[in-house]
Image: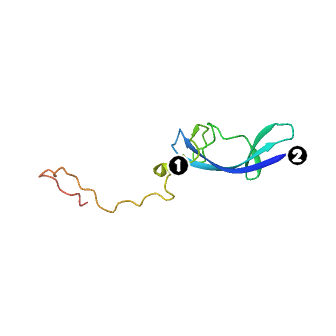
C-alpha cells in the first residue's frame, strides 16, 4: 500500500539583477511505497516541476539570477515585499536652500 501526504509550500525568491522579490506556491506530495522508498513530487498548477532552487527566472526582468529564502522569510520581513502600486509623487514643490543671486531675472520670453 502506498501512502500519500500533501503540503502547500510558499517559497520566496529575490532577483539579484533587478532586486525584485516574489513568492511561488507549490504543492509537495510525499509518497512512500510498500518497499520503504520515499519521494517528494513538486507541483505548480498541477504539473510536476523541479524543486525550487537559486537560478529561477525573474518575472520582472526575465534574468535567471535569483536566490531563495527560507519558507516564511517574507512574512517576517514585510519591508522586502514591493508595494502593488508605486507611491504617489509628493506635491510639495522643491525649494532650493541656496538663495538666488541678486542679478537673477526669470526668463519671460
The residues bearing labels 2 and 1 have C-alpha atoms spaced at a distance of: 39 Å
Mark 2 secondary-structure assignment: loop
Q: Is residue 2 above or below residue 91?
A: above
Q: Is residue 35 above or below residue 81?
A: above
Residue 10, x across and y down, in percent: 62, 49
Q: Please tell me whether mark 2 or mark 1 is closer to you in this view.
A: 2
Residue 51, x across and y down, in percent: 69, 40
Q: Is residue 16 above or below residue 5?
A: above
- The quadrant the C terminus occupies is bottom left
Circle 2 Cα neighbour tier, 10 Å, few/some/many (<14 / 14–19 / ≥20): few
Numbered label attached to residue 74: 1
Question: What residue occupies the far left of the structure in this picture?
Answer: 102
Numbered label attached to residue 1: 2
Circle 1 Cα neighbour tier, 10 Å, few/some/many (<14 / 14–19 / ≥20): some
Question: Residue visible at 17% across and 56% down?
Answer: 105
> 17 or 101, which is in the foreground?
17
> 28 or 23, which is in the foreground?
28
Question: What residue occupies the far bottom of the structure in this picture?
Answer: 91
Mark 2 vs mark 1: which is more N-terminal?
Answer: 2
What count of labels does the image hold? 2
Amino acid at each position: 500500500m502506498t501512502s500519500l501526504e500533501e503540503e502547500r509550500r510558499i517559497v520566496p525568491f529575490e532577483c539579484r539583477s533587478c532586486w525584485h522579490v516574489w513568492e511561488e506556491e507549490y504543492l509537495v506530495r510525499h509518497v512512500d511505497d510498500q518497499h520503504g522508498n520515499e519521494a517528494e513530487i513538486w507541483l505548480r498548477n498541477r504539473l510536476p516541476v523541479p524543486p525550487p532552487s537559486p537560478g529561477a527566472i525573474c518575472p520582472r526582468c526575465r534574468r535567471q539570477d535569483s536566490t531563495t529564502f527560507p519558507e516564511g522569510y517574507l512574512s517576517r520581513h514585510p519591508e522586502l515585499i514591493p508595494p502593488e502600486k508605486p507611491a504617489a509623487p509628493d506635491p510639495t514643490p522643491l525649494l532650493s536652500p541656496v538663495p538666488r543671486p541678486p542679478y537673477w531675472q526669470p526668463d519671460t520670453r
